[in-house]
Amino acid sequence: MSVIDDAIVWLNDPLNWTNPDGIISRTGEHLWISAAAVALGCAVAWPLGVWMGHVGRGGAAVVTVTNLSRAVPTVALLTIFPLTAIGFGPKAIILALSLFAIPPLLANAYLGVREVDPEVRDAGRGMGLSAWQLLRKVELPLAVPYLANGFRIAAVQVVATATLAAFVNGGGLGMIISRGFGLGLASGGGQVLAGGMLVALLCLTIEGVLALIEKALLPKSLRRVKHRPPASVADALPAGS
Amino acid sequence: MPSKVNDAVLGLGAPGDDPRNPWFSWSYVSQNTDTLLAALREHLMLTLVAVALATVIAIPLAILAYRVGALSGPILGFTGVLYTVPSLALFAFLAPFTGIVQPTAVLIGLTMYALLTIVRNTLTALRQVPADVLDSARGMGYGRRAMLWRIELPLALPGIMTGLRIATVSTVALVTVGEIAGWGGLGELIIGGFNSNYYRPQIMTATLLCVALALVLDLVLLAVGRVIMPWTRRRTA
């Protein structure tokens, strides 16, 4: 029997879906850990990014944070955090994942406010809006497409990265893959392949669903982000910066 | 090698702030230099091979997408889908077919991720070459090939180098995930440290080496960029 057959057989066993550590409960685990991490990331990155965009400072810091976050392996934070005062359990995993959600959220919040047409800002000021009113009534609404875009990138990235929690036995769909490897490829190969398919499917689904929600909720006039902006501010920067 | 410390920690059960399990210890580094260097070498090898392969494939692919408009949609779409699939899942797809005796699965996976970063940056850079520059080149009698080699690629080079740097730094971090398929370089020490009674000095040393490797390779590429693109040096100065 080939590995593909093994994977199909594994997926067709109802117990593999309904067991306490089966596909259904693993997916639930995966989703709630991801949701918590994205929520935490938003709570930190959005106010900070919007404020930095509003005062027009900190662009370099956004780039530094983005670049640095690329160099730090997720696996390292996932193994280090449980051994600190945070302790074992979902808290450490959520915290580690949320750190990787921050760069896209921060960069897009900053860019969204920064990219507001200076003339629009001037007009607002000319109408007598205070700085706070300008932020709330002009800058924030115009930044919504960027915020939405950052949210989608961060959410998809976190759902993808949450797979790695399996390295520290932290739950989620990645566990199916790591358990499969644990059995050895000869007997666990089908499970490994099946787990890979489930994870890929979940991530593509989340990406699709979020894109649809974004399309449905954003008013046409605000759908300005035509091409996906580069995954980060740094991507758009010339070499040597 | 770390058994003495491990026994001590094992007796305690959970890892508290045990002075016998510090985050950093020179004695760990000096006693395990060979292991650390071997992991570092594996890490470096996997990164370099993957990025080199990716570059060789990605740049022609990006030129193709740039030249043949009809292909740019499918190429970008495919790289977009691939980017959504987590590395662990990709290794899981490949490993059952390639086995884990050789690092084939890990190398293919790493190459694919580096590939899409480089393709996207190269294509963006090529598209940003100003139209009037292309016009004047055409007016001066440049053919398509001469224009590509002498106008478009040189002008896109800063963007291509940025893509290379991002791909390299990301690949260094991503190699750690290869541990699942038996080839994780320093990742093996990080996860191995976690699994052998939360052995902190090993986790931290391997992590620091990993981040340092990424930064060093980034600086090397930055320097290479300065050398091969002297005009960007003048502009930033």
Image (tube, coloured by chain):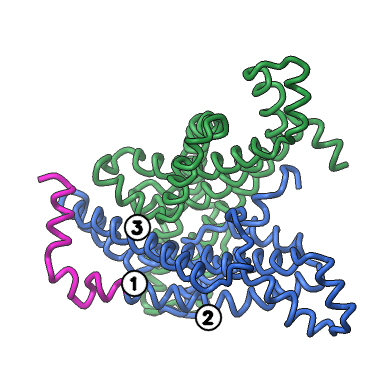
Q: Which residue lies furthest to the front in this view?
A: A220
The three-letter code of the residue at mark 3 reads: Ala
Q: Please tell me whether mark 1 sits on a helix, a strand or a loop.
A: loop
Q: Name the residue under label 1.
A: A171
Q: What residue is disc 3 on?
A: A200
Q: Nearer the viewer, residue A2 or A222?
A: A222
User: Quadrant location of the N terminus of chain B?
Assistant: bottom left
Residue A56 lies left or right of residue B172; in this view the side is right
What colour do you see for chain B?
Answer: green
Label 3 crowd (10 A; few <14 / some 14-19 / many >=20) = many
Q: Nearer the viewer, mark 2 or mark 1?
A: 1
Residue B184 visible in the current orientation: yes
Q: Where is residue A114 in the image (x, y as percent from the top left)?
A: 76, 66
- Colour that chain A carries in the picture: blue
Q: Which-is-in-front pick, marks 1 and 3? A: 3
Density class for disc 1 (Cα within 10 Å; few <14, some 14-19, many ≥20) is: many
As helix, strand or loop, the secondary structure at mark 3 comes to: helix
Q: Is residue B82 left or right of residue A114?
A: left
Residues shaded magenta:
A1-27
User: Residues at marks 1 and 3, common chain?
Assistant: yes
Q: Name the residue under label 2.
A: A85
At x 60%, y 60%, the residue is: A69
Q: What residue type is labelled 2?
A: Ala
Q: Which of A38 and B26 is in front in this view?
A: A38
* Residue contact at pointers 3 and 2, CB within 8 angstroms: no
| Label 3 to label 2: alpha-carbon separation | 33 Å
Asked if A30 appears above or below B127 in the picture, the reply is below
